[in-house]
Image (spheres, rainbow, N blue to C red):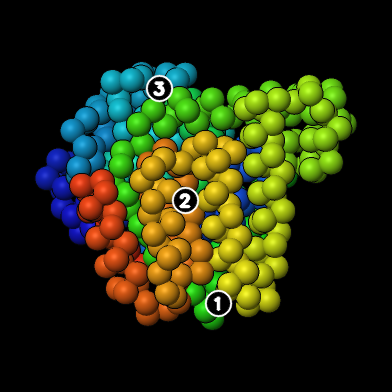
Amino acid sequence: MPERVRRCFAEHHRGPTPGVFFAPGRINLIGAHLDYSGGDVMPLAVDLGVYVAARTNADGRLRLRSLDQEVVVDVPVAALGERRDPDHGWASYPLGVLRIFRDETGVGGGVDLVFGGDLPMASGMSSSAAIEVATAFALDALHDTGLDALALARIAHRAETDYVHVQCGIMDQFASALARPGHALLLHCHDATFEHVEMRGSGFEILVMDSRKPRMLANSAFNERVRECREAHEILRRHARDLPYLAAYQAADLERAGDALTGKHRMRARHVIEEMVRVRRAVQALREGDVAAFGAMLTESHRSTSIHYEVSCEELDALTSLACEQPGVFGARLTGAGFGGCAIALIEPGTARGVEAPVAAAFTARFGVEPRFMVLHAGGGPRRIE
Ligand code: GLA
């Protein structure tokens, strides 16, 4: 892939060889839809991601293309507006980073970028965050601005919220920018503090199961969940007690709020509060090497995401429950925003083939689509490819 982006760059741009930079995608082990409610999440970067060949230019233009997308952008730097232009499609993510990077560092100027990646697109593994972090990392290297990983994560995240206008939490960009090989990231989203949790020798492998169902309307449904959680927090502040973010509440607060908190608001708040407890238990189980307990938390997390948070779908429910029926599987859940895309299963090392075959057969018989499988490992963060 790095060779392919370099070659494509050479086909479209004369002059010196560009730098090639990489940023990983991520899966989320546990902490479903907690980041924008200030909760704890535990993602890990995978060994797949996005590559960008990048070079500054002297003619003040922003030229962006991708190996597998039709939209090509070629605009003057001055055309970079306040918010995304729908015609720019996928390129809104790197353009957002260019905008925020310029706001934060005062450094702009023309740049030529060619992207390619080996992550399945729009499948819940954060290809967009990988594009954003790869772009931020490349700009920092090209302009020698000396930003640290945390600053790059923040720029990448602001590109999404302030330019693309998806109200996502910080998880995806932080997971990509701060990754350490062989580790998961335990991220406390209310104050953006984090620790790396050792995964080597943890006694399981991660099997990604791609439903290949496109995430229809995912952005609008996602923003709707963000709004529902904000409203639920507001109700709890008035009718239970005044805490700074939704994930800080406890089960007793749901009782205290009584009839003021009903319907969707109660269901969303309940998921957030119970998922926080599950994350803590999962972290403890991981540290104690109790894979069975860790897996059980994942499976419960999926149930709640499906029932109380309503972001799953038949395909993801089927994949996870089929996986859990197989020997050697400790637990399974959807990963990412949901509404389609991928699920993960924690499996005993070396058992992937035995899990895949029966899951694929039953899934294909029911949905007429063959799911895709990958065993992935905790990879490192953004880097320059020599
Ligand atoms: C998407 C968002 C993240 C997070 C997850 C759900 O990936 O971009 O910020 O909210 O969904 O956990």
Q: Callout 2, which amino acid?
A: Thr
Q: Quadrant of the C terminus?
A: bottom left
Q: Position of residue 302 (x, y in %)?
A: 53, 50
Residue beneath the point at 41% across and 40% down: 313
**Circle number at residue 202:** 1
Q: Nearer the viewer, mark 2 or mark 3?
A: 2
Residue 97's image quarter?
top left
Residue at x-position 54% and y-position 58%? 299
Which residue: 30% across, 28% down?
89
Q: Which residue is mark 3?
A: 84
- Label 2 – label 3 distance at C-alpha: 27 Å
Within 10 Å of disc 1 (Cα), the crowding (few <14, some 14-19, many 20+) is few
**Looking at numbered disc 1 in the image, what kind of residue is underneath it?**
Ser
Q: Nearer the viewer, residue 325 or 185?
A: 325
The disc at residue 335 is 2
Q: Amino acid at mark 3?
A: Arg
Mark 1 element type: loop
Does 352 sit left or right of 232 as displayed?
A: left
Badge 2 vs badge 3, beta-carbon distance below 8 Å: no
Quadrant in which the N terminus appears: bottom left
Nearest to N terminus: mark 2 or mark 3? 3
Q: Which residue is at the front of the view, 159 or 316? A: 316
Q: Position of residue 90 (x, y in %)?
A: 31, 33
Residue 281 seen anywhere in this rendered image of the structure: yes
Point out the tag, 3 or 1, that comes first from the N-terminus: 3
Q: Is residue 169 visible?
A: no
How far from the left and from the top, in percent, is residue 63? 26, 33
- Which callout, 3 or 1, points to the residue nearer the camera? 1
Q: How many marks?
A: 3
